[in-house]
Amino acid sequence: MSTKKDYFAIGQITDLHVGRKIPFPSGEIDLYDRLVEAVNHLNSIDPPLDMAVVTGDLANHGKKEDYIRVKKELDRLKFPYFLVTGNHDHRVTLTEVFSDHPYLRTGNDFIQYTIEDKPIRIIALDTLEPGTHHGLLCDKRLSWLDEKLQEQKKRPTLIFMHHPPFDTGMPYPDNLGMNGKEEFGAVIRKHPQVEAIASGHTHREAVLGWNGTVAYITPSSAFSYGLEFHDVDDIDPLLEPAACRVFRWDQEVGLVSHISYIGNYEYGITEGVPEPPKN
Ligand SMILES: [Fe+2]
Ligand SMILES: [Fe+2]
């Protein structure tokens, strides 16, 4: 069932970590298989999505052979997709393997770009700082962003990036967070056209109203980490349902965010809508 739609739908998957296999008591999981499931899931959404963004940690070790496998799967998507770099990614190898993605070749040190031909303007930021799992938005990257936002102050804009711009209260991921959050917040405050910021990295969903916009962390499509507010030295992967985010942009309504769980889940048998209770 597919109907003509008057909205624009963007899928977001994040933290694929292809190249990693995780042992669980119930058996080992190859994260490549989780990517296959994620692509099948995005393709099954009906009416179809208009585009997708993959927000980083595509390959666990930034290796060429893993990017080739990631590309083979992502190329099965029935709509255009765009890539954002994460702390596990390698800019040069990524750009080399995805040679048919010209927006990756920005001609400067970072993979930051805008997408101008959609009903909502999209900006991708590069928080990768090679050699560390921390992210960074340095002066150069932030000036680029400020300039781009300045160019179209009235145009609703959605920003994608890998590292979240806020602390979640979970010390383990927060300690591997992004530097430059305050400076980034100062740029965002100047530009109310930013409808939302969508990130990943934490492998767990969180949302915060932040500097006049909404900042989302999208769960990984591969594996999650548990809700852990203690300051632990290490954290084990958790086999929760994998998920993706779907943004539904409607000029009248605005930008609605949905979480969609990847996997096979049963529908119950409904008996219809019950009568409301009578007082
Ligand atoms: Fe990750
Ligand atoms: Fe990450």
Image: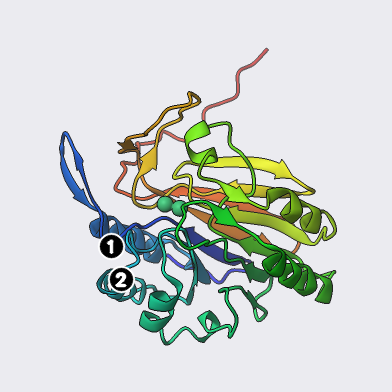
Whole-percent x and y of residue 237? 32, 39
| Residue 134 appears anywhere in the view | yes
Q: Which of the two residues, 106 or 269, is positioned nearer the viewer here?
A: 106
At label 2, the amino acid type is Glu
Rendered image: mark on residue 19: none
In this view, 229 is above or below 121: above
Tell me: 124 left or right of 54: right
Tell me: 279 left or right of 247: right
Residue at x-position 49% and y-position 66%:
85
Q: Which residue is mark 1?
A: 36
Q: 10 Å neighbourhood of mark 2: few (<14), some, or many (≥20)?
A: some
Upstream in sequence: badge 1 or badge 2: 1
| Residue 78 appears anywhere in the view | no
Whole-percent x and y of residue 24? 20, 38
CB-based contact (under 8 Å), mark 1 and mark 2: yes
Q: Which residue is mark 2?
A: 73
Q: Which of the two residues, 3 or 55, is positioned nearer the viewer here?
A: 55
Whole-percent x and y of residue 91? 45, 73
Instruction: Say how the picture is coloured.
Output: rainbow
Whole-percent x and y of residue 242? 37, 47
Q: Which of the two residues, 159 or 263, is positioned nearer the viewer here?
A: 159
Q: Which of the two residues, 8 or 238, is positioned nearer the viewer here?
A: 238
At label 1, the amino acid type is Val
C-alpha separation, residue under disc 1 versus residue under disc 2: 6 Å
